[in-house]
Image: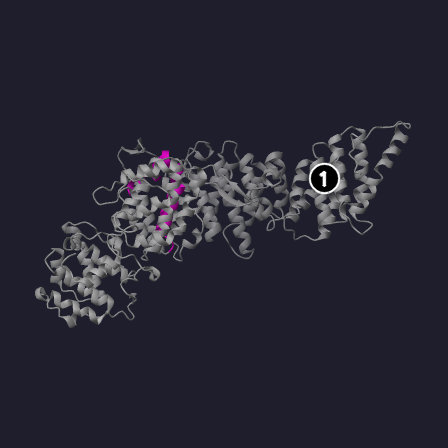
Amino acid sequence: MAGLPRDLIKWIQSLSLSASIKNYKRDFANGFLIAEILNKYYPHEPSLQMHAYDTGTGPAAKKNNWEMLGRAFAKLGITVPRGMSEDVSQAKPDSVGLLLMVLYSHVSKKKEANSVLPTLKASNSYGVEADEVFQPSQVDGSGFAMIDASPGQILTGGTHVKEGLEDHENLGKGAIVRVLLKALSIHDPSITFNRSGFSATQIRDRLCEHIESMSSNEVHRIEIILMGKEREIVEILQHSPPNDISMLLDILITCIASYDAVDKVFVAASCTLQFFGLALQHAFSSRGAAYQHLCSAKEFPSLVHQLSNPHTISKIPHIVAIFHQYMGTNLRDEERVRFWLEIKAAMSRDTLPTSTITIGGIPSTNQSVPSTCNPFIFILAALSFLPNLRELHGPNRQLTTLHLSECLTVINTHRRSLQAPILNPTMPAELPAAVLILAFLVREIGVVLDDPLLGNVMECIGKAVMGRRCSSAVQKAFVAFVAAGAQAAANRGDDVDTGLGKETMVKAAAGVLKWFMGDSLRVALILLAPLLRSYPTLCTSFVRGLLSLSDSERVRLLDLDSSRSGENSATTHISWDLPFLLLQRTEGVCQTWWPLGVSMGVAKLVKNSHAPLPLAYIHMLQAITKPTNPHEESVDHWSTLMEYVGNPLVASLAENTTTEAACILLNNFRILCPGGPVKYLPAMMATLIHAYLTGRGRCQNAIVQLLTHWAAKKSPHPNSVASVSEKLISDTRRILNIVEKELFNGQKLDVSAIVPLPV
């Protein structure tokens, strides 16, 4: 930078611009670096957002950049004659020095800066005198943030940047890509970042190769690693030219387009793209800036193509999450709707030609495949399952209207079809997607469906879901809609006309619990469990639904599987049997149902019965009385329940298939109502003797183990379970001696190997 005053050179070096300056006349000619200098002092000025500036050197790029700079100069009150700007763009001698002097004087507000000007006065033909150069910007009330700091303190938070333009460890050509590789511990000396030798293809291949060598756990930790470097990455993004950001996005989008959704490279690229969407939101304050960066990427059409290609339908939830992250949360409702409609239009005219991309030496072909389905309804369904989406549905409800209109179009199309496609198990997935969207709108947004509309939905799906040929995806979607409608009706009360009749919804829910089977029934139990308190009449149907499950499935659903002790047993997962929706994590049945209603439903079925309690009933009562669950019922309730089920429960101790579960349930009752099982101890001893006489060793061991456990619970109260159990166990030998004398004519029986009596 020979020819510039020393003070200007030191100032420019302190800024650490994104490009290394070799020929300052040529490098400043397109205006990009001028905009970057001002952006460091006015980062929130809309006319100085770097993504809007072009790094090219052609006439069009120069014209665009200098026109925006002219508007910025006018807004900030910086005196830059038009002739000076034109001379800088044409790289005329001394013009760059004069312009930099004007900027330096403006941003530093130093009077001694005027002393630099005489070295340039000889060729000053713009009429800008020394006393005119320093004109402080009038920013009061304008909303522009002017940083009053030394040139070495211009980064966010007042951080001192490294001096010297040659030190570009974190800034410069491909700096953001360099930081990504460093974060992933990719060190390859063959990768260069100079202007002439930079290869995005080489970096992409090396990135894919490294991810393939990682374990699945390491891949899922990438997002955590990047979040730890978020501040550094945001600062670098703020000072990166648009081309560098586009190059990074192109590398990641190509990985998305070329790998299956289950591949490690796809998973890593997806979470990395989502992270950079968040980082770009933080780097640029203007609404939609991050999404505009994504749209500007050269490979953006191939990302849209993944949404419209039937062979890549499993990628939809990940790509929708990417779009959502780049749009951010500060968009106006109409802007968000416009972006999604643009995506829909791009999908409809998608004619991406067949192309082959080589990644890691493996050719990957992208080819458009014609489809008769409506993939945009899949996009909206996936969008509905994103977290915190309720906050994005603004007061003018444009996004809500978009969802509602699309799903009703699909439902009406199927309703009017003469071929009754909903009865066909191979039917398209648009219908369940549309019904799930309706469920989301009713549940999360509070949309009220009028009676004719509700009738159309129930007519279209209500009867068909009971058919044996109906797909599980439609059945599960219908359950979600019924659960949402019933909950909405309960929340609004009887006096409010919700358009969702309670009777209609309760009748539909009862029918679902009665007729559904397999995983559809399991999902119905999960989604309808929270309704039991509002609709007590559903408790009987709910109990019958649980009875219809297999024992193993019921154990898993009620969280009675001891092998899951290390997992988060408070949650479960729902599969919607739709490739464009991920597994949904939700609370388990035991966290949402109404224990009192279910327990009394079981009690009524076994009241006054002395037959052994079926295992399915024991499972339900075992889950209800689990000591680790929060219980709002009183001791009196548990004592009453014990009265109802006590005799059948004790009878279950004599059955090899139910004895262990019955012992667990009896112990739960002892914890919830300490005096409840006392009256049944003699019956338990009689059951023990019966098990001994009939050779049921499994039952003997379970009962003795339970009594021994109770006897170990010392209690000063003479009538406690522990005291009575201890006495009965001490008398067990005497009782067996009486049995030997009365039933076997005094013949000595060897019970030491059968009944493990405590010492």
Does residue 334 appear anywhere in the picture? no
Residue 277 pos. (x, y %)? 35, 49
Looking at the figure, which quarter contains the N terminus?
bottom left
Kind of element beneath mark 1: helix
Front residue of this view, candidates 591 and 541 = 591
Quadrant for residue 116, please give it. bottom left
* Residue 650 placement (x, y as % from top left): 76, 39
Note whether residue 293 is visible.
Answer: yes
Say few, some or many: other residues with alpha carbon within 10 Å of mark 1 (under 14 / 14 to 19 / 20 or more): many
Identify the colour scheme used: one colour
- In the rendered view, tell whether residue 596 sits above or below residue 610: below
Q: Tally the marks.
A: 1
- Using the image, determine if residue 66 lies above or below residue 431: below
| 580 displayed left or right of 358 | right
Residue 242 magenta-highlighted: no
- The secondary structure that most of the magenta stretch takes on is helix
What residue sits 21% from the left and 65% below the top?
104
511 relative to 160 in the view: left or right: right
Magenta residues (range) = 300-329
Which residue bears the numbered disc 1? Answer: 663
Between 734 and 430, the one lying in front of the other is 734
- The spot of residue 220 in percent (x, y) is 43, 42
Query: Magenta stretch: residue 312 in it?
Result: yes
